[in-house]
Image: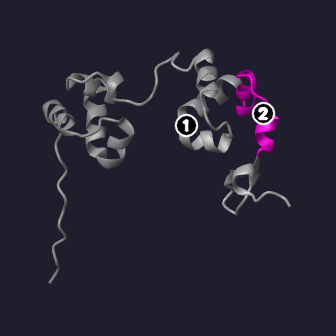
Amino acid sequence: MQQEIPVKSRRRWDQETVLNEIRKLETLSPRTVQQQQPSLYGAAVRLFGAWRTAVEQAGYSYDNVTSRRGPGYWSNERILREIRGLRELNSNCVRHTSVGLYSAALRVFGTWQRAVESAGFDYQAIRRDWVPMDNLGLRFRRHAYLPAAS
């Protein structure tokens, strides 16, 4: 006797159902929705042409939904101002704490070093102040973590 294999039924999406589901979400970030509810995301794109359009049709301002900055947000002046305001200029630190700034600096200046130097800092002095300390590639301030030489 053969055992019946349960077949998962596919949800039928229409525009109103998509909009209602979007209104129930805690986050409207396209990346998050793609990962957590791919069928909703796919239906929204299929029925509205783009996730942005579906979100706007649901009554939300897309600019308030996404963390992606619009064109011109990271101007040269803004990048330099942000770099000057950082407590730590080491690229490893900035890459993890200010991803947007780091990415914009690379896009505009080509390298983190050029961005830091354009902000008026001596990059070689910053690099000399950091040394590799473990197998994970983490870097620590020389004067903060190493004992003073006797």
Residue 123 badge: 2
Q: Foreground mark, 2 or 1? A: 2
Whether residue 68 appears in this view of the structure is yes
Residue 38 vertical placement versus 45 (above, below): below
Q: Is residue 9 magenta?
A: no
Mark 2 or mark 1, which has the lower sequence index?
1
Residue 138, position in %: x, y? Answer: 67, 55
- Residue numbers of the magenta segment: 110-129
The image quarter in which residue 22 lies:
top left
Q: Which residue appears at 51% of the width and 18% of the height?
A: 73
Decide if residue 135 is on the left or right side of residue 47.
right
Label 1: few (<14), some (14–19) or many (≥20) C-alpha neighbours in 10 Å: few
Amino acid type of disc 1?
Val
Residue topped by disc 1:
99
- Please tell me which residue lies in front, 95 or 54: 95
Q: Residue furthest bottom?
A: 1
| Image location (x, y in percent) of residue 71 | 50, 17
Residue at the image point whose x is 36% and y is 36% from the top: 30
User: In the rendered view, would you say 139 is above or below 47?
Assistant: below
Q: For the point 30% across and 35% down, which residue is it?
A: 28
- Relative side of 133 to 57, left or right: right
Quadrant of the rendered image containing residue 49: top left
Q: Main secondary structure of the magenta part?
A: helix
Q: How is the image coloured?
A: one colour
How far apart marks 2 and 1 lie (CA) works out to 19 Å
Q: Name the residue nearer the viewer: 118 or 88.
A: 88
Q: Residues within 10 Å of mark 2 (few under 14, many from 20)?
A: some
